[in-house]
Image (cartoon, rainbow, N blue to C red):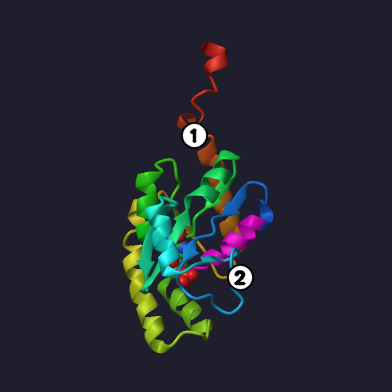
Amino acid sequence: MSGPSGCGKGTIVKALLEKYPDQFALSVSATTRAPRPGEENGVHYHFISGEEFERRIAEDEILEYTTYCGNYYGTPKKELYERTAAGINVILEIEVEGAMNVRRLCPEAVLIFVLPPDPETLEARLRGRGTNTEEDIKNRLLTAKREIAVMKDYDYVVINEDGGAEIAAKEIAGIIFAEQHKIERCPEAAKAFIG
Ligand code: 5GP
């Protein structure tokens, strides 16, 4: 799942996990960036050093990784595979380059792009956070433009209206539940009947 900063991914994921706690889980990425106030190690990210991150890459413990604003971000393999083996839908909240790598490495992954309803709403949400400088807002809007240009390579798009996180979460669940019923994902279903 990707979407520009300010599209409301975090709120949607929260709503999704609350509504379907047994079917969905969030992948906790490893990063070398410093925790923000309120962020907990092991909950929001695994906060690790650059040295430790590079060790994990070398040991093949990271499925995909990228550098973003000078820091490493990556998806730990072990947690992901343990959960998918248990039948849980694991959500990777990652930027577009990482998503394209996941597409290549895990062709069974479903790629969902979250969009705000319109550019004005995106800008208003970024400004509404109050924690970003003018330069930061301009940067994020530019990055958003670049990210949205990659959306055509995703499988689905979900629009997150103002106050619409619960609806968006339901739409995402609907996409995943439908995907689970695709014939190619159930190769054994007919076997007992037709041999
Ligand atoms: P932030 O520093 O705001 O938490 O995250 C910065 C960007 O890194 C966001 O676009 C987020 O989705 C992305 N990101 C977080 N974890 C990963 C990861 O494991 N892999 C990749 N490729 N991107 C990630």
Q: Nearer the viewer, mark 1 or mark 2?
A: 2
**Is 133 positioned to the left or the right of 83 in the image?**
left
Q: Position of residue 181 (x, y in %)?
A: 54, 34
- The range drawn in magenta is 1-17
Q: Mark 1: which secondary structure?
A: loop
The number of callouts visible is 2
CB at mark 1 closer than 8 A to ligand 1?
no
Q: Tell me if mark 1 has few (under 14), some (14-19) or many (20+) residues whose alpha carbon lies within 10 angstroms of its own.
A: few
Q: Position of residue 37 (x, y in %)?
A: 58, 79
CB at mark 2 closer than 8 A to ligand 1?
no
Q: Is residue 4 magenta?
A: yes
Amino acid type, callout 2: Glu
Identify the residue under disc 2: 40
N-term-proximal mark, 1 vs 2: 2
* Visible residue check, residue 114: no
Q: Tell me if mark 2 has few (under 14), some (14-19) or many (20+) residues whose alpha carbon lies within 10 angstroms of its own.
A: few
Image quadrant of residue 36? Answer: bottom right
Is disc 1 in contact with disc 2, using a CB cutoff of under 8 Å? no
Seen in the picture, residue 83 relative to 92 is either above or below; the reply is: above
Q: Mark 2: which secondary structure?
A: loop
Identified at 37% across, 76% down, the residue is 141
Tell me the CA gap for discs 1 and 2: 37 Å
Image quadrant of residue 109? Answer: top left
Identified at 40% across, 83% down, the residue is 136
* Visible residue check, residue 143: yes
Amino acid type, callout 1: Lys
Which dot marks residue 182?
1
Q: Viewer-proximal residue, 159 or 195?
A: 195
Identified at 56% across, 13% down, the residue is 193
Which dot marks residue 50?
none
**Is 26 positioned to the left or the right of 139 in the image?**
right
Image region (quadrant) for ligand 1: bottom left
